[in-house]
Amino acid sequence: MSSRLFQCAPNLSEGRNPQLFSAVQQAMQGMPGVAMTDLSMDHDHHRMVVSLLGQADGLREAVLRLFEIASQNIDLSKHAGVHPRIGAVDVVPFVPLGSTPMEAAQAVALSTAQEVAARFELPVLLYEYSARNPAHRNLPDLRRQGLQERLLENAPDFGPVQLHPRLGATVMGARKPLVAFNVVLESQDLALAREIAKFLRGLPSVRSLGLWLESQRRVQVSINLTDPERVDLEEVFSHVSEQAALRGVAVHSSELIGMAPAASFVKMARTRLKMLTVQPGQLLEWNLLNQESLYER
């Protein structure tokens, strides 16, 4: 029997509804063969990230359940948040873990994408290692304005050409581990945060945006490390701290979104990063060691 394991991190465009948060939590905790290791919601980003570990069949059913919940509770036409998005369930990555090959993640992403498009009648675009169309490979490109017009030129991989009126579209595919990491600055200067984000985008495998957090009355540098072995958390945090200090600004705090490989934490400590809320359950390897029930024997 297969013991191939995957991480799946569906991103929902809802971060302000505690009832929906509870509904997702309850639904995922009841999914057989799936472990929900982290669930986070952010008011300013208006976004929820669900961190799951499991095998292909269980994760496919979990993703379909999340789409059911989203279809009943999220209307993207009324959505407003600082994080870019194209769908109620915005992106669904599948990450192979351990000895699981990338081809296995591609297979589960493909079958899930087909089922989602058919059942919920919305466009699904395959990205990263699953991309069939080069125009769909990079997530930031898909989130740029004018997606509907671009879908008419480059049809989605599955589903209709027209965006769903409430659910929009979904991006799905296989990728390597990614670290999502945010740094909040003791500043209200959005231009400053954007300058630092632009500097970070000059580093290899780093995506970054400068954002305003109304709830904190501070700015944030939002960061994705698409290859954390090339540029790690400590390095990017040091760059943010140094660039902020050059402008007379201090770091308020940082946060990890979802899970990260344990190796990402080898060079740093909680006091170094001021990461006030990090928990062991957010570490991939920790979960692999503590979720033996996910393996078929």
Image (cartoon, grey):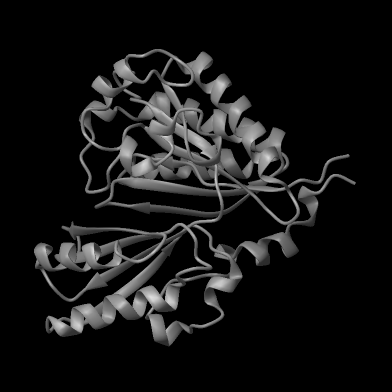
Q: Is residue 185 left or right of residue 188?
A: right
Q: Position of residue 226 (x, y in %)?
A: 46, 57
Q: Residue at x 55, y 30 (%)?
A: 65
Q: Is residue 221 visible?
A: yes
Rendered residue at 30%/15% (across/down): 152
Q: Residue 55 or 97: which is nearer the viewer?
A: 97
Q: Is residue 163 visible?
A: no
Quadrant housing residue 204: bottom left
Q: Is residue 280 above or below residue 37?
A: below
Please give the count of numbered marks on the rendered protein: 0
In the image shown, does 121 or 15 lie closer to the viewer?
Answer: 121
In the image, residue 268 lies at what x, y percent? 48, 83
The answer to whether residue 76 is above or below residue 200 is: above
Q: Is residue 155 above or below residue 41?
A: above
Is 12 rendered above or below residue 207? Answer: above
- Residue 28 is situated, as x and y percent measured from the top left of the image, at 58, 41
Question: Can you name the residue that lies furthest to the front here?
Answer: 134
286 on left or right of 174:
right
Q: Is residue 77 left or right of residue 37?
A: left
Q: Quadrant of residue 146?
A: top left
Q: Is residue 273 left or right of residue 99?
A: left
Query: Which residue is at a point 28% across and 75% down the rendered structure image?
Result: 240
* Residue closest to the eye, 30 or 134: 134
Residue 163 in percent (x, y) is at: 32, 19
